[in-house]
Image (cartoon, rainbow, N blue to C red):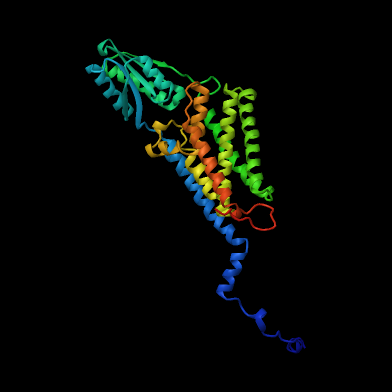
Amino acid sequence: MSSLHEQEQPRPHPPHGEHGRAPTKAERWTSYKKSPFLPACVLVVILAAAAALFAASYTYSMANPTPHNIPTGVTGERDAARRSAFVGAMEKALDAELDLKHYATRAAARKAIDEQRIFAVLDVRDKGARVELDVSSASGVSVAQVFSEAAPVVSKKTGIPVTAKDLHPLQSGDPRGLAIFYISLAAVIIGFVGAIQLSVHARGLNPAERIAFTVIYALFGGFAVAAVVDWGLGALDLPFVESWLILALTMFSCGMVFTMFNTFFHRWAMIPTWGLLVLVGNPASGGAVAPPLLPTFVGRLGQWLPPGASVNAQHTAVYFQGHQHAFPFLVLAGWGLVSSGLFWFWRHKHPGGRGTQPLHAAAV
């Protein structure tokens, strides 16, 4: 009976029409491209690559700092044979070439340190019978350290007594000289993360409003960082207004860098932003490792990027007051103005705004 009952059950109809047809490979690909799985898979690949690049970038730049070409002042008996022997022995101990710059007086050499044109001074005394070594931890604690460690070795090898002095020691709350790097890093990251949050939570902002709010959160954020580090933790005694404005300018520049990339790359804007500011900019900034100990190209490139310019300006403001340079401010302002200009000119491409019709670039 059971087999007879099974025979009486109606058989399913074979598939028919468009709904019954198996999708083609092209249709499956089209469906996959419209699904959330494609960007998710792309992100898996990108994040894995970013993790590898992040580790490689920081390890290559900072894991094994090695002296390269160190600008060093020389004063005293210029032609003394013992001085030449001492310099040669110092280069061998450092395993680096000293870019020697000769100064007529020790005062002139120390002024060059104040202006951060050199990192140390070798003052040859008594026809090469002794050498006085001036270093500057504030110029780069890692450079001062390698000089200080090499000096006793060279003194023993050459028989020339060496006296070392630190002209610009670090503040007691920042014994490793990393606090400036950290506050600059905070300004860089919060700068572009703030722009990301504006694009997510305040998508309807029009171009002028977006720039205005970037300025506002940069000012508030820079003030908060400076206040916490100086007044709250006492880690650094900052020239408050100058440090605040440097942090604010850094935040604004980095925020507008993301906004510019968002105009052209939309949801993928984080990739070039992260690459420029974090993968390349931060390890090349000279904040954690002084530029003479970075790979030569990396150290030079870093000064032209917002993180390096921020560290440079902040470093001079804290430790070399009265010797501030215009260059880092021009770099930060340049990135901010160029990014703002490109965003404004192509604002009709930006995914934000609340206009009823797409905005078009103004006619020339």
Q: Is residue 176 visible?
A: no
In the image, residue 285 lies at what x, y percent?
A: 47, 35
Q: Quadrant of residue 217?
A: top right
In the depicted structure, whether residue 59 falls above or below residue 121? below
Residue farthest to the front? Answer: 364
Tell me where residue 132 appears, x and y as whole percent: 34, 14
Instruction: Tell me if residue 152 comes above or below residue 214 in the rendering.
Output: above
- Give how far across and how far down residue 192 sits, in percent: 59, 42
Residue 216 picture quarter: top right
**Image-based side of 29 in relation to 161, left or right:** right
Query: At x 60% / y 25%, what residue is drawn?
Result: 241
Q: Which quarter of the image is occupied by the N terminus? A: bottom right
Q: Position of residue 34 (x, y in %)?
A: 62, 65
Front residue of 291 and 14: 291
**Left or right of 4, for residue 359:** left
Q: Residue at x 70, y 57 (%)?
A: 356
Horizontal side of 311 relative to 4 (left or right) equals: left
* Residue depicted at 40% across the width and 18% down the height: 110
Residue 150 can be seen, yes or no: yes
